[in-house]
Amino acid sequence: MKKGTIYLIPSVISPDTANQVLSPQVVDVVKKTTVFLTETIRESRRFISSLKLGIDISSLQFEKVDKDTADIETEKYLAPALKGKNIGVLSDAGCPGVADPGAQVVRIAHKLGLQVTPLVGPSSLLLALMASGMNGQSFAFNGYLPIDTKEAAQKIKQFEKTSRSQNQTQLFIETPYRSDRTLEILIKSLNPNSLLCLAKDITGTKEYIKTQPVNQWKSHKIIIGKEPTVFLFLAP
């Protein structure tokens, strides 16, 4: 029996941008898929509904896979693919498997001998890197900084040291309600000559991407608010 395919389906990273950022292949795969593994079921339902494909959402099967999902549960959710059923993997925003628990699904899919097919779509990390003007040959995504301010500052200095010694761009994300705090810590902790890029609401109507030395950010502070933001820096 031919096994099904695991499709990694990118979603939008800013509302109402599907026509601009998603390929026709994404729409075609969503139309033909009835089983989805997703980080947040509500977000995935909303995303599919927003595509206006005439799909009865109640007829679709959704299974939640997040950082707390055990491997044995994920294997169970992938079982239909062993019998020929295609399965879609959805992230809350952007590309599954990149800074996303979908990576767990992909790892187990490979273990089970299933074909994994990534589809073209927006990644805030790569789009921010592209627009930053920083080193795209060597870069590291570091996830979230520690919540504690002192620990966050220590981490920033540690990554800045790596950036300087390896000419490596450092990337971070943050929960929206802590973005302004994170920007403040970065400005205070980084060397004044280090380049700092702020990339918020990428692909959205409030998109703002700016790279400048930290000492210029000190006199050019902005309010990020709750817009999704990627932070990047490169030490000289």
Image (spheres, grey):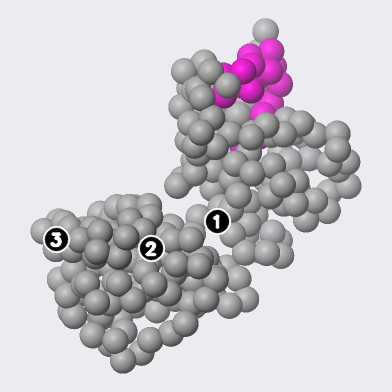
Mark 1 or mark 2, earlier in chain: 1
Q: Which residues are the magenta region?
A: 74-90
**Residue position marked by numbered label 1 in the rendering:** 122
Q: Quadrant of residue 207?
A: bottom right
Residue 235 appears in which quarter of the rendering?
Answer: bottom left
Residue 228: x and y in percent read 52, 66
Instruction: Give the camera-side residue of 41 and 116.
Output: 41
Indicate which disc residue 129 carries: 2
Q: Nearer the viewer, mark 3 or mark 1?
A: 3
Residue with the most extreme bottom position: 219
Q: Quadrant of the N terminus?
A: top right
**Number of other residues with Cα within 10 Å of mark 2, as a class: few under 14, some 14 to 19, many 20 or more:** many
Q: Measuring from the top left, give residue 151's x and y in whole percent.
A: 25, 59
- Residue 161, labelled with which disc? 3
Q: Amino acid at mark 3?
A: Lys
Asked if 219 appears above or below 225 in the picture, the reply is below
Left or right, 19 with respect to 225, comes to: right
User: Which of the pair 127/49 is nearer the observer?
Assistant: 49
The residue lying toward the viewer, choosing from 209 and 226, is: 226
Query: Callout 2: helix, strand or loop?
Result: helix
Locate residue 219, reporting x and y percent. Answer: 31, 91
Circle 1/circle 2 CB separation < 8 Å: no
Q: Residue at x 60, y 41 (%)?
A: 39
Would residue 38 appear left or right of 130 to someone viewing this image?
Answer: right
Q: Amino acid at mark 1?
A: Pro
Residue occupying image coordinates x 36% and y 89%? 220
Of marks 2 and 3, the one in the foreground:
3
